[in-house]
Image (cartoon, helix red, strand yellow):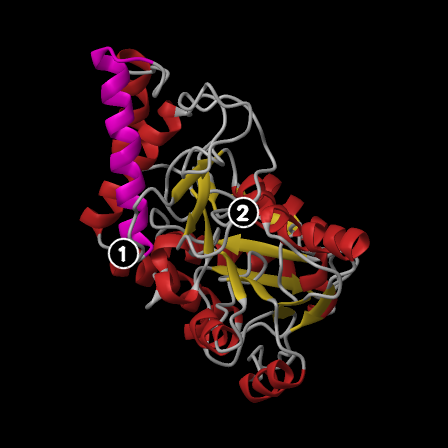
Amino acid sequence: MDIYLDNAATTFPKPEVVIEAVADCLRNGAINAGRGAYPLALKAERLIEDTRNAVASLLNYNNEGRVLFSASATLALNQVLLGINWHYGDIIYTTPFEHNSVSRVLQHLQDTINVKLITLPINCKTLEYDLDAIKQMFNKMPPKALVMTHVSNVCSLITPVGIIAEMAKSYEAIVVIDGAQAGPLLPLEKAQELVDFYIFSGHKTFYGTFGIAGFVTNGKVPLTPIIFGGTGSHSELLSMPEDLPFRHEVGSSNIVAIAGLHAACGWLEETGIANIREHERALFKQTVEELNEYPDVKMYVSGNLENHLGSLSFIIEGYTAQEVGIILSQEFGISSRTGLHCAPLAHKFLGTLPHGTVRVGFGYFNTGEDVESFVEAVRTIID
């Protein structure tokens, strides 16, 4: 049986309750919510609001209409980063581990508005952020905004977002967190106070389906809409409504994916966030400890494995990442992800250009036996 280790791309398989909820919605409730007063349409509206509340709770926010859905985390990041009222010379701090869904938008802002992008300092050997240096940088060049990933999609390194956000907030900076790889598995204390926009992805750590993502806002920073169209309300207006979520949610809601996300939130609560997180981390640690026995394997991990979640990047001496990925797939039935992982700046920082790394990502449905099979495959490649 094939072993799926690409959970950083999307968690798979999905919980059975998610599959059942999607199928049930398709059969009995795939209705255009917010566009009618008949029972099925009203039921769909209630499902959407219940899902907003569930997402907000898992991310430590109060809802109050401030969970906004979109089709993907990439789209949500564009809505946030392009919707903020930037000015010439604004200073934006970011990390060397950003996904292109962040870095390409920031590059666009630099090219068009001439914002100033500054990378937060991090030790390339220990992969630890230099908090003292960051404090000094903020004091010398106060941030307009702090835009950073919560967890790296390349190596699952956890950014100390709470600490850095608290520093930035002393300068009244806007804080935007890309939580696609973290989401409910790493809920932030004081999230509503410290983070103005938290982006989430339904099909990754929420264990839902494709087609549903979004952002949570504390409502303190206004956003200009970048997408326009029908909202199912305020139809007499030719401009976008001012109130949330209608100002940024355009077109028909993906009620089928929302049904899956709602079920996923229930599954997360029932299974236990800590149980899921620690299971993924335990598999990660087991893998690192066993691969440490092979000097031909170079792993990109910090000195403290607690600073990672569930994905490992590595290379094998004498092979490109792509060669290793092909062998793992064709000879051992193991699914991994190779290359630059849509995060070239991370690989530039790690020194893994141009080929990148092999990434294996563990999910809740992986087992210790999967780790053993993977490690044995690596040993065979080396031998």
How many numbered callouts?
2
**In magenta segment, residue 122:** no
Q: Position of residue 286 (x, y in %)?
A: 41, 67
Name the chief secondary structure element in magenta. helix
* Relative to 355, residue 76 above or below: above
Q: Residue at x 40, y 23 (%)?
A: 233
> Which of these two is toward me, 275 or 191?
191
Res. 160 mark = none
Q: Residue flagged by tag 1: what amino acid is it?
A: Ile
* Relative to 319, residue 170 above or below: below
Q: Is residue 263 visible?
A: no
Span shown in magenta: 36-59
Q: Position of residue 207 (x, y in %)?
A: 37, 42
* Relative to 73, residue 41 above or below: above
Res. 223 mark = 2
From the image, tell me which residue sits under label 1. Answer: 273
**In whole angstroms, how far apart are the C-alphas of marks 2 and 1?**
31 Å
Q: Counting residues from the N terminus, which is met first, the one under dot 2 or under dot 1? A: 2
Q: SS of the residue at dot 2?
A: loop
Q: Position of residue 314 (x, y in %)?
A: 61, 63
Q: Residue at x 45, y 75 (%)?
A: 166
**In magenta segment, residue 47:** yes
Q: Residue flagged by tag 2: what amino acid is it?
A: Leu
Position of 352 with respect to 253 (left or right) is: right
> Which of these two is toward me, 296 or 181?
181
Q: Position of residue 253 (x, y in %)?
A: 42, 25
Q: Residue furthest left?
A: 270
Structural crowding at the residue carrying mark 2, measured as other residues with C-alpha within 10 Å and reported as few (<14), some (14–19) or many (≥20) = some
Q: Is residue 208 visible?
A: yes
Q: Name which quarter of the figure residue 44 lies in.
A: top left
> Which of these two is toward me, 281 or 157?
157
Q: Residue at x 58, y 84 (%)?
A: 130
